[in-house]
Amino acid sequence: MARRRNGFMQLAEKLESGFLAPFILGVAQSAQAVVKDLQELGPAWSGTFSNSWEIASASKVTSGSGAAGAPQRLLAPILTVDEFKFKSELKYYIANKAPHADVALDLVESSYRYPGFEPIKTAQRGNRVSGIRGDLSIGSGPNRRTAPLDWYTTYVRGGNIDKRISTYMDQALRNVKL
Amino acid sequence: MNYQAIRAALENPLLTAFNSLVPAVPVFFDNITAVPPNTTTEYVRINITFGITNEPTLTSSVDNARGALIIRIFTEKGRGPARNQTLLTTAVNVLENLNNTAKPSTGTFMRLGEINGPTFSATDEAPHFVGRIDTSWVATVLT
């Protein structure tokens, strides 16, 4: 009797895993897409900031290499069934571990010097107004920026994260086989 | 989509509030850079950015937009945070009033999200102490 009950439980767990798999993948793909957007939208002079994003779940973290150069794709750690079912609404934590991240995100002021090499991304020229990275009066001035002012706040608070998540979760829903 | 109406719905009450202070505090919006470099004079910088526009909803209207509002207060460095926080309070009060405004039958209906901050920063080289808040906004143009 007990053996038959264990068999039913194992079958139920397998069915549950199979049913949840598209959603678990959908959440992971959403997180990856968000990081890709942030890499594309954000500033990139040497590329170290673009390659310093990390995606963390409750149990695992995947980190960018922090290397200079073109942005590298970052894969999200796959959630376990229990993490997907029982953890709070916050499934992933996305952060940038570059030492100058707050400056690149336009959150704090800093001072800027030419690093001795040209940016890997097209830059806009202008005159620096304040110590905020993107705060340039666009024109023919000596200063440059490789992403517009407040690019990060606009992305996070302007609804684009919701759009990314709904795109991949809709796709996950279409992949469910009943 | 009437971007200018949305911008005006956010900018006008903030401008009025800072102009009503004694002495009035200069406010600079997007694409206005009247601040002389390295000035020690206090001022307010307001940036309004658009995220998603014409987002389909359950209503027939697609004249909806979402975006971010970023307010930075620049005050004299080395004098403590009090003045900066006083000016931030002025801005936050305006945002709270906007959220308490009833939905009009015409014009622009605006709602703001949670306010992130304030965060403060200063550097050795810049002459200001900077306070920053940001929030999300959702607007529907009703006319």
Image: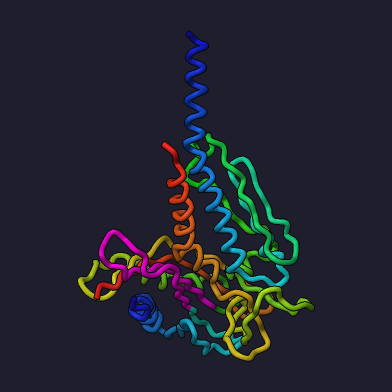
Q: Quadrant of the C terminus of chain A?
A: top left
Point 41% across, 73% down: residue: B90
Is-magenta flag for residue B19? no
Find the residue positioned furthest to the front: A177
The image quadrant that residue A115 belongs to is bottom right
Across and down, in percent, residue A131 comes to: 62, 77
- Left or right: where A69 falls relative to A32: right
- Left or right: where A72 falls relative to A149: right
Point 56% across, 76% down: residue: A148
Image coloring type: rainbow
Across and down, in percent, residue A168 comes to: 48, 52
Is-magenta flag for residue B71? yes
Decide which of A140, A131 is in the foreground and name it.
A140
Residue A4 seen in the figure: yes
Find the residue positioned furthest to the right: A116
Across and down, in percent, residue A81 comes to: 53, 35
Is A178 above or below relative to B104? above
Start and end of the magenta stretch?
B46-74
Is A134 above or below relative to B66? below
The image quadrant that residue B114 belongs to is bottom left
All told, the count of numbered labels is 0
Find the residue positioned furthest to the top: A1
Decide which of B92, B8 is in the foreground and name it.
B8
- Left or right: where A109 falls relative to A6: right
Point 51% across, 71% down: residue: B82
Residue B12 seen in the figure: no
